[in-house]
Every structure is written in C-alpha cells, then in structure tokens.
Image (spheres, helix red, strand yellow):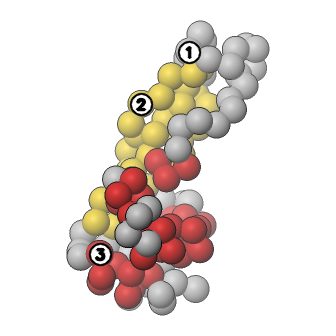
Amino acid sequence: MNEHVLPLLIKSYVVRCYHCNRWLGRFPQWYGDDGNFDCECGSTAIKIREGRPFGPQSKLWPALMKEFKRDIVPLLKDKRDRKWTLESLVLRCGLSELLRLAENIA
C-alpha cells in the first residue's frame, strides 16, 4: 500500500471574489473559511462554495497527508474536537482503522 494513500477523501471549498468572480483558491475544509482573501480587483469580499474532494490523485495529496498526520489525527483522537474534524472528511473505513493506517504515513 502506498504510504500516502488512506481510505478517505478530504472535503474542500472553493473561494472566489464576490465582485469579479476571480478564482482565489481551493482549500481543505479543515482550514475553516475565515481566512483573509484579497483579490487583484481590490475587493476583499468573497463567495465560498463546496468544492471537489481532494483524493489520492491530487498533486497536493502527499502534503495533505503530512498535514493530516501532524494536525488532524490528534484532533480525531480527542473526542471533544472530533465532530467538526470528521465533517471535513469522507471516510471509506472505520475511524479506528483510519487512525491505525495514519500512523504509517511518513
């Protein structure tokens, strides 16, 4: 099994400028949606919609997996923070199996 492939998808959101509709980026939902965005048109107003989930075919997958292990796995282990974190993931296995597999990420 590839060390960067886990049985999950990471939900994303897409950010565009509210005024000129310029693409500002696609981000994992675990980042939240309260970032500062400045468009080249000078606007800071944005519109956000749900994007395509990140999966193993994504060029960003290795970096997302490192971030997942470093930042998200501890939140999943803590029952108080688990709910909002799980809402940003699409699991294709049980949570305990996912946490076990995540330990093998380099």
Q: Residue furthest toward the top?
A: 19
- Residue nearer the viewer, 80 or 31: 80
Classify mark 3: helix, strand or loop: helix
**Would you name the residue on which mark 1 appears?**
18
Residue 73 seen in the current view = yes
Look at 51% across and 84% down and name the residue there: 105
Look at 44% across and 62% down and name the residue there: 81
Please state which amino acid type lies under the numbered disc 3. Answer: Leu
Seen in the picture, residue 30 relative to 21 is either above or below; the reply is below
Reading the chain from its start, which is encountered first: label 1 or label 2? 1
Reading the chain from its start, which is encountered first: label 1 or label 3? 1
Seen in the picture, residue 69 relative to 27 is either above or below; the reply is below
**Would you name the residue on which mark 2 appears?**
49
Residue 44, given in percent of the width and then of the height, sits at 68, 19
Look at 28% across and 66% down and name the residue there: 91
**Would you name the residue on which mark 3 appears?**
95
Going by the image, does 92 lie left or right of 25? Answer: left
Residue 3 seen in the current view = no
**Image quadrant where residue 93 sits:** bottom left
Classify mark 2: helix, strand or loop: strand
- Residue nearer the viewer, 58 or 84: 84
Give me the C-alpha separation between circle 1 and circle 3: 37 Å
Please state which amino acid type lies under the numbered disc 2. Answer: Arg
Image quarter in which the N terminus is found = bottom left
Reading the chain from its start, which is encountered first: label 3 or label 2? 2
